[in-house]
Image (tube, rainbow, N blue to C red):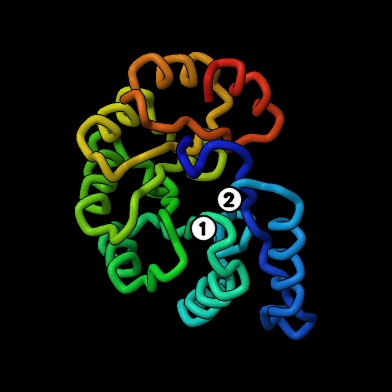
Amino acid sequence: MNKFQGTGVALVTPFNTDGSVDYNGLKNLINHLVEGGIDYLVSLGTTGETATMTKEEKKKVWAYTAEINDNRLPLVAGIGGNNTLAVAEEMKSFNTNGYSAILSVSPYYNKPTQEGIYQHYKYLAEVSPLDLMLYNVPGRTMSNMTPETTCRLAHDFKNIIATKEASGSFDQFNQIMRDKPEDFLLISGDDPVTLPMIALGA
């Protein structure tokens, strides 16, 4: 069974009233989720407010999360952005200790073409120190990664192992399930459609 099948939880990042990270709160949250029986954790995805944090804060949160998790569950780090070279540099400098994969959101704001999205992920796949998960969330990025682009990436790069889909399109989910490599995972990124996506094989 793939280590990322099942329920993965995107961790929130607790903050103190002075704006600093509440590490004790983060520790309690991680332990609560691990003991609650989930299958893997995502550190500093959208829910973790990564877009509002400094590079140093992110490094500390990633390291602390790995320390508290202590290899009890697979860990995924959220590293993404719309500047391909900047994301690549962040990936190359990432301390992979305790982590199994990187989740990287499709470029936002720039409204890239499908070829632009492909080239962005191609570059990242070639430098990523860990397996890579695509993340399609057009409601936030304002551009949709089509099933053709998703499956092209999945077939072209063995270290691209999954996509987190939050497009809300069942036609899109079906097409990905039909055309993806057998071991490539389609992961629900939108809670209201999780059950029907599971029924489709996600």
Amino acid residing under circle 1: Leu
Q: Position of residue 185 (x, y in %)?
A: 44, 32
Q: Earlier in the sequence, mark 2 or mark 1?
A: 2
Where disc 2 sits, the SS reads strand
CA gap, disc 2 to disc 1?
A: 6 Å
The quadrant in which residue 28 appears is: bottom right
Dots 2 and 1: beta carbons under 8 Å? yes
Residue 91 disc label: none
Q: Is residue 33 left or right of residue 60?
A: right
Which residue is at a point 61% across and 46% down the rendered structure image? 39
Badge 2 crowding class, 10 Å Cα cut-off, few under 14, some 14 to 19, many 20 or more, is many
Q: Position of residue 36 (x, y in %)?
A: 76, 51
Which residue is at a point 62% across and 61% down the rendered structure image? 48
Q: Choose between 161 and 69: the one closer to the eye.
A: 69
The residue beneath circle 1 is 75
Which residue is at a point 52% across and 34% down the rendered structure image? 187
Q: Position of residue 85 (x, y in %)?
A: 25, 63
Badge 1 crowding class, 10 Å Cα cut-off, few under 14, some 14 to 19, many 20 or more, is many
Q: Above or below — where is 175 with respect to 25?
A: above
Q: Above or below — where is 82 with respect to 20?
A: above
Q: Choose between 145 and 179: the one closer to the eye.
A: 179
Where disc 1 sits, the SS reads strand
Which residue is at a point 31% across and 27% down the rendered structure image? 151
The residue beneath circle 2 is 40
Q: Above or below — where is 94 with respect to 80?
A: below
Q: Position of residue 158 (x, y in %)?
A: 25, 40
Amino acid residing under circle 2: Tyr
